[in-house]
Structures are given as C-alpha cells and as structure tokens.
Image (cartoon, rainbow, N blue to C red):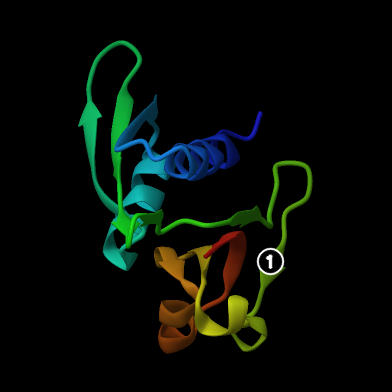
Amino acid sequence: MDTLANMLNGIKNAGLVKKTSVTLPHSKMKGAVLELLKKEGYIKTFIVSEGVKPTVEVVLEYKDKSPRINGVERVSKPSKRVYTGVKDITAVKYGHGTVVLSTPKGIITGKEARKEMVGGEILFKIW
C-alpha cells in the first residue's frame, strides 16, 4: 500500500465534500509532507495525537469556498521510483502548482530544490 498517496487522496477528497478536517494515520514521512503543505498554504494546520496508533488531524484550507487542493498526482511510487536532477525540475500547471521532492536536504518543493541546487526523488505534484 502507498500510504502517502492514501493521505493525499484523503485530504483532496475531504476538500471536495467541504469537510473542515480529516483524520488519518500518522508517520514521520507524512508529518514532513504535512509541514511542507502547511508552509505552502495548502492546509491550515495539523494536530498529531500520540498513542498506540498515532493519528493526525488535518484542518483544510479553503479559498472562496473552494478547496486549495484541486488535484494530486503521485509521481514516484513504491513500484517505480522516479528521480530527477536539479536541471530537470519543471513547473506544475504553469506555475500554479507545486512539485514535492525528497532530497538529501529533506522534503522540499521544486522551487527550493532549484535554489539549493539539489535533485532527488519526485514524490508528487499538487495544484
């Protein structure tokens, strides 16, 4: 199972049915991705609850009564990893989207990767 894709689709689908928040299973990777999505303005905030099975509650962001996340495309999958160099990082939806990469400097956007001059695994595109 691709837990990152499940999380992203859960957030996107919750926004499409106008929910204010969604609760999902938590992991360190998902926490790093959620921190990036919060910084980029795709979600308002997230709250991690500890326990035997930790969960995270994601509070969604809306702009003019429509969700900020309109689409998600998972690029690198567990069955097929996709890597890119810094020169091959392209814009998403003519600059209206974001590409998220896993690099040696952590999970960062394509814009930050070009600034830091580092490539890595393309996790997903979001717009």
| Direction top: furthest residue | 52
> Does 109 sit above or below residue 90?
above
Front in this rendered view, residue 81 or 94: 94
Question: For mark 1, does the 10 Å Cα neighbourhood hold few (<14), some (14 to 19), or many (20 or more) residues?
Answer: some
Q: Quick check: 56 above or below 92?
A: above
The answer to whether one can see residue 91 in this image is: no
Spot occupied by residue 13 in the image (x, y as percentages of width and height): 52, 39
Indicate left or right for 55 with 98 as reference: left
Residue with the mark numbered 1: 83
The residue located at (68%, 66%) in the rendering is 83
Three-letter residue code for mark 1: Tyr
Q: From what the image shows, is residue 113 above or below residue 115? A: above
Task: Determine which quarter of the picture holds residue 66.
Answer: bottom left
At x 57%, y 56%, the residue is 71
Does residue 24 show up? yes
- The structure residue drawn at horizontal position 45% and vertical position 41%, both measured from the top left corner, is 11
Q: Which secondary structure, mark 1?
A: strand
- Among all residues in the image, which is located at the extreme right? 80
Task: Please identify the quadrant where the N terminus is shown.
Answer: top right
Marker count (numbered): 1
- Decide if residue 33 is on the left or right side of residue 127: left
The image quadrant of residue 81 is bottom right
Q: Residue furthest front?
A: 65
Residue 102 image offset from top left, x and y in percent: 51, 60
- Relative image position of residue 42 (x, y in whole percent): 36, 59
Residue in view at x 45 percent, y 71 percent: 109
Residue 9 in the image: x percent, y percent? 55, 41
